[in-house]
Image (spheres, rainbow, N blue to C red):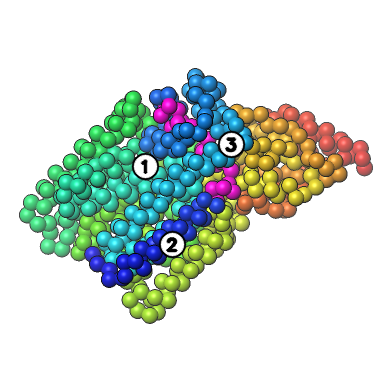
Amino acid sequence: MTGQGRGRPRVVTALAAALVAVHAGLVLHQASVQTPTYDEPYYPSSGWARLVAGDTRLNAEHPPVVKLWLGASWLGAGLPPPRDIPGFRTGDQWTFGPRTLYQDPARAQALLLRARASVLLLSVLLAVGVFLAARRAFGEGAALLALALYVLDPLVVANAGLATLDLGAAAAIFAAVTLSWVALDSGKALHLALAAPATGLALGSKGTGIVTLPVLALLAVAPAIRSGGAAPGELRRRALRALAVLAGGAVVLAVVTLPEGPAGWWRALDWQRRHAIAGHATWAMGLQTMQCWPWFFPFAWLVKTPVALLAATGAGALLVALRVRRDPTTGVALLAAPLVLLTVSVVSGICNGVRQLLPATPFLAVAAGGALAALGRSRPGKLAAGAILVVLAAALLLVHPNAITYANEVAGGPSGTWRLLTDSNVDWGQSVGQLAQEVRGLPVQRLWFDYFGTAWPPAHGLDRYRKVQDWRFTAGAALPAPRRDGPDPRGRELYAVSATCLVDAYVRETDLHAWLRARQPRSWVGNSIALFDITGDAEAYRQMARMAERMGDPITAVEAAARVREIEAGR
């Protein structure tokens, strides 16, 4: 399943560079618009503390490789010593992360952009890897198509500009698998020397990195299913090469997990195992559970992937599967990781985001590039392939800069994603800055903010609000929330609520926000924050007071009840 591609090298290079540039531009703009998502204060800060102070206590539930990469982006940023930041001495990441990011509120967004830019760099490198892998498998035409499918994927764009672990883990896993594919095929020392550290970095990137181990084993025995069987001695040679890759990867893993070494990596995996056993709140289509439904990830994937991309990747997977007897190592290299990843995710017990399937995207893009290249051998096929790319580009541009909230047309589009999924699938706390811009143009007397996230609103232009706080969740409460009214005493009274809170995704009382769900918001900010007008609405304030009492927020309850009395007295 190899191809040489006869296109003009300069034209191919120019087109590839243009695609990557478009990707980088979209991601950077999105990164500049979005405020920190729920996890972003914790990963760069813990990586930075590990680099500067050798501290391994912060965010110990994840392996360190991507966190170290993120933390390195903060070196030279003028931060104070970690020991001077609250939360460091007690190993409290929930305090240390926000206090580090917002120690100078005016520089918080710039500090975040440094970490986000480092993730974008990994996405660019991954895009290059997709191009090279597709060229090896199918030729230069397929390589360009695969690259286009990768850089225009809303799931990729959504995560390529976030200072989180998912894109970094995807890049490391893809590098480990594809370099091992090349190394086991060639046996060359250089290839083995590249595959080994890539495997170690993949294992140390995130818990999902462990999928590289079964894929490496499958790559070693793949020729056994070739038509005619493996050549004499081939399986033994490939097994020895796989062992060499694994041994080198173990050494690299031991180094990057210092000062704890592999014991710290194992503890992180065990933490994830215990987390899965305990369960994690999952919400979809109004249903709620503490376990992972077997259908959750397939459903989320179908909702969050453009229809054009579903068609292309489905055709690509079918093409590779049909040719697996002819070229089994390519088939294993492209399909094994997505299949193992999906299997592991379904049984993981933690189903809070389709981002857990992000490492599958580059493999599927390569396979889809091969399918579109094969389709393009006829004139109708060329038109169909072109249409797929145009529709995919349009889907991304229409949702920009809110790619996190993407849902395809069959699922109702981005404006309705919140009715089907929640958390990092649509509302991860990223729209505070957009909310600040929205209310800045309105006459506002009072803004109530019911927020799911860890960003500190005053640092992002929203400094006049009254926070509605469910004290069962303390993440995001490390910094003070000002209770200030808007600048216009005769203005509107507004209630802004994150979609995750609106559907009561993380609480047993699924009717807490039912009174709001029955109302029509005046607008949806960034597709993730609903903005309601409750000016002079005594019933709305009465419902708010009852809700705040149940949430353990006596301040809001008292203030809302007082407003009920004011409104009724005014009548």
Q: Residues within 10 Å of mark 3 (few under 14, many from 20)?
A: some
Using the image, tell me which numbered label, if any, was put on residue 208.
1
Is residue 363 within the magenta segment? no
Give the spatial CA distance, label 2 vs label 1. 31 Å
Q: Amino acid at mark 3?
A: Arg
> Residue 377 falls in which quadrant of the image?
bottom left
Q: Amino acid at mark 2?
A: Ala
Task: Tell me whether circle 3 and circle 2 mark residues in contact (CB < 8 Å).
Answer: no
Q: Residues within 10 Å of mark 1 (few under 14, many from 20)?
A: many
Which contiguous range is marked in magenta? 30-52
Q: Residue at x 39, y 62 (%)?
A: 16
Choose the circle earlier in sequence order: 3 or 1. Answer: 3
Q: Residue at x 47, y 33 (%)?
A: 76
Asked if residue 23 is positioned above or below residue 105 in the image, the reply reads below
> Residue 248 falls in which quadrant of the image?
top left
Asked if residue 135 is positioned above or below residue 286 in the image, the reply reads below
Residue 329, horizontal then vertical, whole percent? 22, 56
Residue 419, horizontal then vertical, whole percent? 59, 52
Using the image, tell me which numbered label, if any, was put on residue 18.
2
Is residue 43 within the magenta segment? yes
- Closer-to-camera residue (518/445): 445
In front: label 3 or label 1:
3
- Residue furthest to the bottom: 379
Using the image, tell me which numbered label, if any, was put on residue 54.
none
In front: label 2 or label 1:
2
Choose the circle earlier in sequence order: 2 or 1. Answer: 2
Q: Amino acid at mark 1?
A: Thr
Query: In the displayed structure, does residue 277 sit left or right of residue 197?
Result: right
Give the spatial CA distance, label 3 vs label 2. 32 Å
Query: In the displayed structure, does residue 241 sit left or right of residue 155?
Result: left
SS state under label 2? helix
Q: Circle 3 sits on which residue?
A: 107
